[in-house]
Image (tube, rainbow, N blue to C red):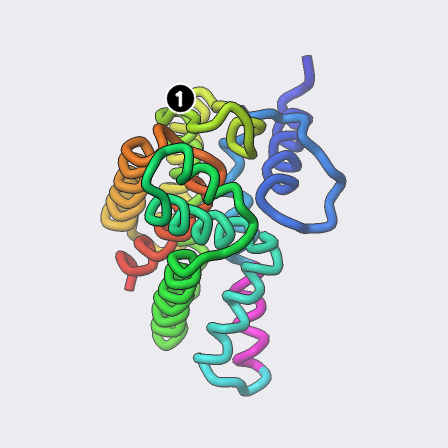
């Protein structure tokens, strides 16, 4: 049986390998129970974004440009994983008339009009809220949103059935409710540490995650990797709004 430090290291590497495109050793040793580490990966993503924004401001660029740099940094670190899920979710849930057709659309790598609209609105909302945070020096809000939005994902995986017999979410597996609870608690702790607030952003994140989960169950019978990506993006926006 591996020691606790070894297990923690393995789980964090597993989370980073799944949620980022950082040049780390390919690692999947932790399995679905490594999902507790996802808020920590969110903190890493948020800190990299903040570093990019701070560098832009240091170079004399405007807060608007710094906001663009921060969003670009997030997308580069994650490979646009969550944004791709948001686009596919919007196309599938609103572009098909039957469950099978919706799942087929979500698997299609091409992006449709609903996906474009969702991405444009999501980036516009995030950019507006990030710039607003920078204007008052609230850097912690940006990191907290990245942390808490990933802290709710294991809960969706643990509580909502899979919509497919294959796919990314099915391949990752289902974390236990205890692991999901730990991820959420870590997300709450990180948010409190970074912003001094927790109740309102937590309610916002849980509310949008629950709403999207219910919609996914109604439309396709459960969650997929794309649904999880959409939950992360929308939860991030909700947390930023709660902290604005």
Q: Which residue is mark 1?
A: 177
Q: Using a 10 Å C-alpha cutoff, classify the residue at mark 1 as few (fewer than 14 neighbours), some (14 to 19) or many (20 or more).
A: some
Of residue 89 and residue 63, the one placed in the foreground of this image is 89
Query: Would you say residue 151 is visible in this rendering?
Result: no
Q: Provide the residue span drawn in magenta.
A: 48-58
Which residue is at a point 62% across and 22% down the rendered structure image? 4
The spot of residue 98 in percent (x, y) is 34, 36
Of residue 108 and residue 188, the one placed in the foreground of this image is 108
Q: Quadrant of the C terminus?
A: bottom left
In the rendered view, tell whether residue 209 sits above or below residue 36: below
Asked where in the image residue 142 lies, by quadrant, the reply is bottom left
Which residue is at a point 38% across and 63% down the rendered structure image? 117
Residue with the most extreme bottom position: 60
Looking at the magenta stretch, what is its main secondary structure? helix
Q: Left or right? Give the position of 200 relative to 82.
A: left
The spot of residue 137 in percent (x, y) is 39, 72
Asked where in the image residue 181 lies, by quadrant, the reply is top left
Which residue is at a point 35% across and 57% down the rendered structure image? 237
Q: Is residue 77 magenta?
A: no
């Amino acid at each position: 049986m591996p020691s606790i430090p070894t297990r923690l290291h393995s789980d964090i590497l597993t989370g980073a390998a799944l949620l980022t495109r950082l040049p780390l050793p390919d690692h999947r040793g932790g399995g679905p129970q490594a999902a507790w580490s996802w808020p920590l990966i969110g903190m890493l993503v948020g800190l990299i974004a903040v570093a990019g924004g701070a560098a832009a401001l240091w170079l004399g660029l405007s807060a608007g440009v710094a906001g663009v740099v921060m969003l670009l940094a997030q997308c580069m670190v994650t490979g646009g994983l969550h944004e791709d899920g948001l686009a596919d979710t919007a196309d599938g849930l609103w572009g098909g008339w039957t469950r099978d057709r919706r799942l087929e659309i979500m698997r299609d790598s091409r992006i449709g009009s609903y996906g474009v609209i969702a991405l444009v609105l999501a980036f516009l909302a995030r950019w507006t809220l990030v710039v607003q945070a920078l204007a008052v020096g609230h850097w912690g809000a940006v990191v907290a949103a990245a942390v808490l939005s990933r802290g709710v994902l294991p809960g969706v995986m643990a509580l909502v059935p899979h919509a497919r017999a294959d796919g990314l979410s099915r391949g990752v597996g289902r974390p236990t409710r205890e692991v999901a609870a730990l991820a959420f608690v870590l997300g709450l702790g990180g948010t409190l540490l970074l912003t001094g607030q927790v109740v309102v952003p937590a309610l916002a994140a849980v509310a949008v995650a629950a709403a999207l989960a219910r919609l996914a169950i109604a439309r396709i019978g459960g969650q997929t990797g794309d649904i999880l990506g959409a939950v992360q993006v929308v939860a991030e926006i909700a947390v930023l709004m709660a902290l604005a």
